Structure formats: C-alpha cells, structure tokens
Amino acid sequence: EAGVTQFPSHSVIEKGQTVTLRCDPISGHDNLYWYRRVMGKEIKFLLHFVKESKQDESGMPNNRFLAERTGGTYSTLKVQPAELEDSGVYFCASSQERGGLNILSGNEQFFGPGTRLTVL
Amino acid sequence: GNSVTQMEGPVTLSEEAFLTINCTYTATGYPSLFWYVQYPGEGLQLLLKATKADDKGSNKGFEATYRKETTSFHLEKGSVQVSDSAVYFCALMKWGKLIFGQGTELSVKP
C-alpha cells in the first residue's frame, strides 16, 4: 500500500510569489490533515478535511493560505502571496476513520515526508 | 488550552546508553498520547501511543507510560543505537487533531 505522498519535496520561492503544495493521501482515507513546522519549533495543525469538506480550519494562519480537496482525493495548499515567515516544512497526514469517530478515537494519522518551503 | 512540552535538545548519547526524553502535557479530559519519530530525510512515523491512563505504549525497545497524575508521557529506551538518531515528537490528540511538542533531536554516537 502506497503511503502519503507530497509534492514537491522542496520549493524555493521569492517573497510575493505563489506556491502550491500537493498531498496525495493513502487510498481510501477520508481524513486529510495539513500541519506545519516553522523554524525548528513545534509542528502546528493547519486544517482537517473529511472527504472534500473542511472539518476544522482553525489553524490556518491567515487568508493567504487556501486549501482545497476537490473530489475528496488529493489536496492542495496554496500560499499567495508568500511571506518570509511562511518558510518551514509542511506535512500532510491522512487517517481512515469516517464521520466523527476520529475525534474520539486515538487512531493513527499517517504522515507524508513533508514539503520544505523556503521563501527568500 | 491544550499543549505539549518536551525537553529541549539536542541530546547526544553514546551507543548503549539509557535514554529518557521528558514530555508533559496540558489538556482537558483524557487525550490520547503519542510519540512520533522523524529519521533524517524521512517523514513522521508513529513510534508508540497510549489511549488511557496507565497504558504503556511500546515499540522497537522504546516505552512510554501515560501518567495522569503527573500529566506526563516520558519516552525511554534502555540501550540506544546509532540508528535511533532522529527527532522525536511528543503529541496529544484532541478533537481529531494532533498537538505536538517542539521536538527533541537525538544523536547517538558509536
């Protein structure tokens, strides 16, 4: 079974440019999460999709970030325009539970390798 | 609010040394607790987990016990190997999302 994949592995852009990160979850996983680790600090939650719907986007830092999951399969995270403080590693994760069960169970989230974003 | 605090790194040990990485949490209720590991060049992998008080998670020689009275989930290994060199993250799950500590980098020297 293929794991969670992310593309690109590394992106270097200039301040003000746009970048789109992609995540392909494990096939059949309804839940998809985005997290971010900035400058060696803690990994922070950004948002959670259940299929194509945003379940929780409380961690999105501002309106320069737009996440989509059309068709409930892969997801994209667009940063427009990028700022210096957006640099970091963006992780995607997926899990299998359906509906609201995952908020109570401790089931595993499977992580991708991350995309390292550098904004110059 | 909900938060996780873990000991700062980097931690440098010699092979076969005993490892402890401290982790404490603040949360309402009884969240599930996790240790994730990130090996160089790889993504996060679940190392172990515990879902209720007094549970002990274990994997690959690592152990952690869910201590409700001290709100702790310290990671231990009796004899580390060079291959254990990685960044270790303690986390709790609340309402489906993981809340992580800042990570502890471990370097094991031969």
Image: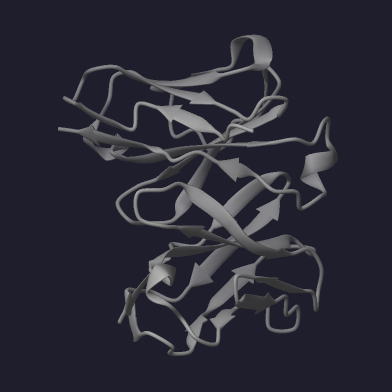
| x 82%, y 48%: residue | A104
Which of the 4 quarters of the picture holds residue B81?
bottom left
Residue toward you, B28 or B101: B101
| x 55%, y 82%: residue | B77
Which of the 4 quarters of the picture holds residue B40?
bottom left
Q: Position of residue A61 (x, y in %)?
A: 44, 34
Relative side of B94 to A120, left or right: right
Residue B2 in sight here: no
Relative side of A85 to A44, left or right: left
Vertical placement of B107 versus A116: above or below? below
Residue closest to the far top: A71
Relative side of A55 to A113, left or right: right
Residue A94 in sight here: yes
Vertical placement of B100 versus B53: above or below? above
Quarter of the N terminus of chain A within the rendering: top right
Residue toward you, B26 or B42: B42
Quarter of the C terminus of chain A within the rendering: top left
Q: Position of residue B22 (x, y in %)?
A: 52, 79
